[in-house]
Image (cartoon, rainbow, N blue to C red):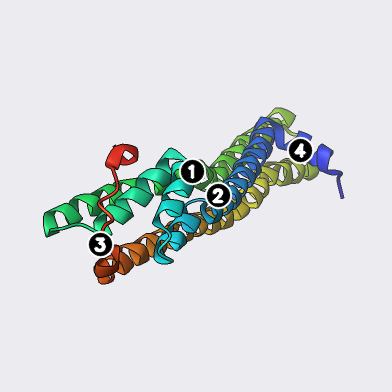
Amino acid sequence: MLQTYEMLEKAGVVGYCLVGLSFLTLTISLSKILQYFWFRISCKKGLFKALDLVRSGKIPEAKSVADKDTAWSQKLFYAAFNKGLAVNREEAQHWDDEAQKLGDKLLTSLESGLSIIGLIAALSPLLGLLGTVIGMISAFQALESAGNNVDPSLLSGGIWEALLTTALGLVVAMPAMVLHALLKSAAHQQLENVVEKVNGLSEHLYLNRGEMVGHNLVSPKAAE
């Protein structure tokens, strides 16, 4: 068995490109995992806490928590609050549209970079195949140059070296496909958690409008 470095050398430029793509996939994946982890903690300390305070009837405290959170979280909080206390269908639809826009923005942020992983998963096998074709061409050129003194080992050695890039391309592509699917699913799960919480608050406010007498619609400054 050849050492990894020796095999990589035989794979040539295409092999180094594939290794580079594998490191890029790993880097993006780790950054997305950290992003999802931080987003979940941020929601628990900010948006979700504010929403739970509203459900407990602690409106001033909820507003205070929301105002200290990120701009995106503030906007979503106020959109959910105003939707729940909307006085007519048009107003409720307006705030629902605002919440939808914020949800789309969140999903775009959570999925940023995943298209690169998907591209790597699709491109790696083709890049590996290209390396194999180039290697086969080189092997047959060497065979032609040998003339009548053809050594079968020359051809067989050239073929297996050429096939290294195909194998390497598949090794890079398969984990990339799995990571792409898992991270995309995680992004949608994060969004679903937020949507469930926000819709739950709006429904709670709507069903308990009588208890909210004296609470005007929240100023939409943070939602602008």
Dot in front, 2 or 1 = 1
Q: Residue at x 36, y 66 (%)?
A: 200
Q: Is residue 185 above or below residue 160?
A: below
Marks 2 and 3 in Cβ contact (< 8 Å): no
Residue located beneath label 3 in the image? 213
First reached walking from the N terminus: tag 4 or tag 3: 4
Residue furthest top in the image = 145
Q: Quadrant of residue 44?
A: bottom right
Mark 1: few, some, or many residues within 10 Å (few <14, many ≥20)?
some
Q: Nearer the viewer, residue 207 or 102?
A: 207
Dot 2 amino acid type: Ser
Residue 11 x %, y %: 71, 37
First reached walking from the N terminus: tag 4 or tag 2: 4
Residue 33 x %, y %: 61, 50
Would residue 134 be seen by someone viewing this image from the given angle? yes
Dot 1 amino acid type: Asp
Mark 4 → mark 3, Cα distance in angstroms:
72 Å
Mark 4 → mark 1, Cα distance in angstroms:
49 Å
State the SS at label 4.
helix
Q: Residue at x 29, y 68 (%)?
A: 211
- How many numbered badges does the structure rendering display? 4
Q: Quadrant of residue 150?
A: top right
Q: Residue at x 27, y 47 (%)?
A: 98
Mark 4: few, some, or many residues within 10 Å (few <14, many ≥20)?
many
Dot 4 amino acid type: Leu
State the SS at label 3.
loop
| Residue 8 - label | 4
Dot in front, 4 or 1 = 1
First reached walking from the N terminus: tag 2 or tag 1: 2
Residue located beneath label 1 in the image? 69
